[in-house]
Amino acid sequence: MSNPNWIKDYVGNLHIVSYGRYRGDCPSCGRVHTFSVTDTGFERLWYCFHADCHIKGSTGVQLTKDNSKVAFKERTVKQTDNDEFEIPSTFVSLSRSKEAEEYVKRVASYDAYLNGLVDIRYDLQQDRVVYLVKSISNGRVVDATGRSLTNRKPKWRRYGNSKYPFVCGTNGLDLFICEDCPSACSVSDCVRGLALMGTTLLDEHVEVIKQFKKVYIALDKDATSKAILMLKKLRNYVPTKLIVLNKDLKDMQIGERNEFIRRYID
């Protein structure tokens, strides 16, 4: 679809930091909060999510001496004191892949994505849905984890060397501990969700978890024995409860899931 030059100018003049995202009203169809822009550092990708519009395109970012320094700084961010993570150039807007968007919708991550609670990209090279892992203290990207849309192994790939957990949401100081990123995103309407990206509690996870006021462990039912060990450890740092799931959080309907969560946090 060709785009008039004024839309390119509009997108180019938006105040978005390098590797940042913008969500607002569509300048073409006028629908509220349907227009998304992703800055990749060297181009801006835009897309309207409304069914009657779907205007999309890209425009290059004019690099000056100042913003090229910012772009380089944003590409290389600290994971730990000794490691660095560089966002691969193959990470593009989620809207570039219909299959990726459908996966995100299917696993209850799409609302969090639309509301700006999580940064999800598509890896063109590996055909993966990528959840960016960000520091809760400053919002900087410290790692990324990607889920294969094909039979590529491993099914989930950690791109960097960080052991930092994935955290989604901005609501309060209650925290649900989950196994995977989609489950953490699914609870973000009510609480913050944290994904261990497995069933092992690391010291790096504890450092993040103990910043919260109340913690609820909500792992899959087959990981109950590990959840009990986590409960014993975390109670040394923060009030913690164990929730035994009969159904995966991301597989619940939104009303069912929110009602389930509020039973514990209200």
Image (tube, grey):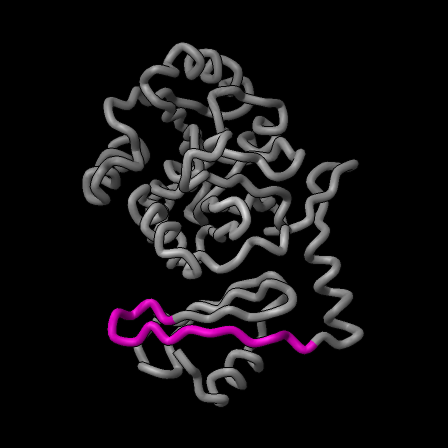
User: Is 65 in the magenta?
Assistant: no
- Compared with residue 66, is residue 212 higher up or lower down, i.e. above or below? above
Instruction: Name the side, left or right, on which 150 lies relative to 107.
Output: right
| Nearer the observer, 13 or 213 | 13
Instruction: Name the side, left or right, on which 147 lies relative to 265.
Output: right
Q: Quadrant of residue 164?
A: top right
- Compared with residue 27, is residue 181 higher up or lower down, i.e. above or below? above
Q: Position of residue 153 (x, y in %)?
A: 49, 30
Q: Position of residue 105 (x, y in %)?
A: 31, 49
Residue span colored magenta: 48-62
| Nearer the observer, 151 or 60 | 151
Q: In this view of the protein, can residue 165 be seen by the observer?
A: yes
Instruction: Name the side, left or right, on which 98 lies relative to 194.
Output: left
Quadrant containing the C terminus is top left
Q: Position of residue 57 (x, y in %)?
A: 46, 74
User: Is 56 in the magenta?
Assistant: yes
- What residue is at 42 percent from the left and 73 percent from the top? 56
- What residue is at 34 percent from the left and 46 percent from the top? 103
Q: Magenta residues: mostly which secondary structure?
A: loop
Quadrant containing the N terminus is bottom left
- Compared with residue 132, is residue 179 higher up or lower down, i.e. above or below? above
Instruction: Name the side, left or right, on which 113 lies relative to 10.
Output: left
